[in-house]
Amino acid sequence: MEYFDLIVIGFGKGGKTLAATMGRLGKRVAMVEQSAQMYGGTCINIGCVPTKALVHHAEHPGAGSPAERHRKAVDDTRALTTTLRGKNFANLDTIDSVTVITGRATFLDAKTVRVTAGDDVLELGAETIVINTGAVPTVPPIPGLRASARLLTSTDLIDLDHLPKRLAILGGGYVGVEFASMYAQFSSAVTVLDAGPRIMPREDEDVAEAATEILRGAGVEFVPGAHVTAVRDIENGVEITYEAGGETHTLAADEVLAATGRTPATEGLGLERAGVRTTPSGAVEVDEFLRTSSPNVYAVGDVNGGPQFTYISLDDSRIVTDQLTGRGRRSTVDRKFVPYTVFMSPALSRVGLTEREAVERGLPVKVVEKAVADIAGMPRAKIVGETRGLMKFVVDRETDLILGATLLSVDSQELINLVTLAMRQGTTASELRDAIYTHPSSTEAFNEVLSTAPRETHREGNVLS
Ligand SMILES: Cc1cc2nc3c(=O)[nH]c(=O)nc-3n(C[C@H](O)[C@H](O)[C@H](O)COP(=O)(O)OP(=O)(O)OC[C@H]3O[C@@H](n4cnc5c(N)ncnc54)[C@H](O)[C@@H]3O)c2cc1C
Ligand SMILES: NC(=O)c1ccc[n+]([C@@H]2O[C@H](COP(=O)([O-])OP(=O)(O)OC[C@H]3O[C@@H](n4cnc5c(N)ncnc54)[C@H](O)[C@@H]3O)[C@@H](O)[C@H]2O)c1
């Protein structure tokens, strides 16, 4: 048995950050990762980075046929992730007191982990263990789906050598929308079937409609309220049977992507032997300090059931670092205004409350919004040829504080971070409106959008004064 100060199970964002921090403090750290293809975790290998690289290629097509352009995008993306994987390994491997161990970990008890790699078995002990095993794609139990040779997860689709002529996507969430947008641009005929009544249920209706129109314009078909009942392989493809609007339909496709959520990866971890409880949805149960039900065992990232974003896993690592080296005060309760971006083209980014949420809370709401194409003071949209979308701010009309913002626009993945900072600092909408911004930039749109005459909210009982 080899002893460490800290064992991290899973090379994800939170775990690798923590391992590096503790290693640099001279602590003996074991980083256990089940696959050499996953050094650096989901984000750089099969998640954020490859998908956004493919989005970029889809938006900026080079020469050649659609199949050739797609193939080049996949090849370039593989090269990028290979480079990042190597760098991620080196980042930990070059710290003297950190050991990267490639194998699958399972708890023997709360302080001992067994690592298996083929016939090799190692036992490791530590006072502190951090679970950072991420999440895996959920494949719903639809008859025939799991057995289909045409079933893809996001991990498969990133690495697909050929361009599907017809791509069916189950699920219109983050993964579904991003792949729909990029594959439509790669020239696949894309159909998204979602169980919900509309895509992007988290967004205001006007925003979801604008996003849907953009995606439809790119060639994506949507089937909302689709209850998929069966999937079966047919010659040269797959047939999907679904019920929608009280009728039964079939859809033929070359491949089918399951984009129906991601389940915390706890299978085979032996959590019960360590006294680590899980929630009814299968996540590792944690408190606001990310402590599990077992003393000195923490869980960070997707596996703890929090929002599934890389930057949340990173923030989780800050909380555990504070537990291990600081005053132990930082917690998930400190998180205010967490933004997100769906990387369709253009990107859809949001922070804070939607109009609907603000009205439902009984807040005195005023809404200012403008279509990107109508923002005269934002020539950047015209320069780069991306004038689709809208910018919308929900403002408290009494305090002038920004309650929320939705930006469906070029550069919105950058702009939303500025709005988030403004909200965290209590910057008012007028201050954001009257600030000096560089030109030509996308940020300068705020000068104009926030000067727009407020409109009545779409909700009854909360009409603007
Ligand atoms: C297609 C896609 C696109 C995404 N795009 C974005 C985006 O644009 N922005 C964003 O913020 N988020 C995005 N996400 C979500 C983001 O990737 C995750 O939230 C984030 O990577 C989770 O990191 P983590 O720290 O929880 O662990 P992960 O990075 O998932 O790492 C977990 C690691 O644990 C390993 N492991 C699991 N079990 C064991 C075991 N028993 N023993 C040893 N090792 C084990 C796994 O192999 C894996 O490497 C995307 C996800 C997907 C799937
Ligand atoms: N840009 C980003 O930040 C980004 C990108 C990709 C993924 N992610 C993360 O990964 C997580 C997983 O993404 P996701 O898109 O798989 O999940 P999701 O929860 O965002 O969306 C799943 C969708 O599938 C639908 N659905 C569920 N079961 C279905 C069924 N049987 N038939 C048809 N539709 C069904 C749901 O109605 C929902 O719209 C996200 O929650 C997100 O946190 C983030």
Image (cartoon, helix red, strand yellow):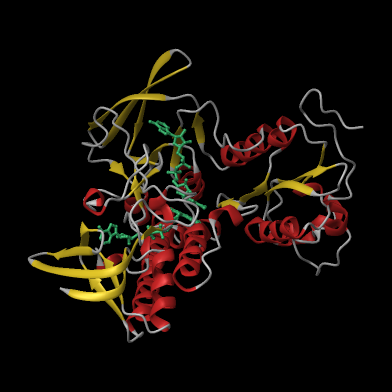
Query: Where, quadrant-wise, is the C terminus in this rendering?
Result: top right
Whether 232 is drawn above or below 444: the answer is: above
Quadrant of res 32: bottom left
Task: Using residue 453 as the reference point, say whether residue 339 is left or right of it.
Answer: left
Residue 240 in the image: x percent, y percent?
33, 28
Task: Using residue 400 as the reference point, say whether residue 100 is left or right of it.
Answer: left
Query: Where, quadrant-wise, is the N terminus in this rendering?
Result: bottom left
Quadrant of res 138: top left
Residue 126 in the image: x percent, y percent?
27, 70
**Residue at screen point 52% across, 62% down:** 315
In front here: 235 or 136?
136
Residue 242 in the image: x percent, y percent?
37, 22
Can residue 424 be seen?
A: yes
In front here: 290 or 420?
290
Residue 109 in the image: x percent, y percent?
21, 58
Residue closest to the far left: 119
Answer with the quadrant where ligand 2 appears in the image: top left
**Residue at screen point 25% across, 54% down:** 274
In front here: 360 or 243?
360
Residue closest to the far top: 246
Can residue 107 be seen?
A: no
**Residue at screen point 32% across, 52% down:** 156
Whether 385 is drawn above or below 75: the answer is: above
In front here: 386 or 90?
90
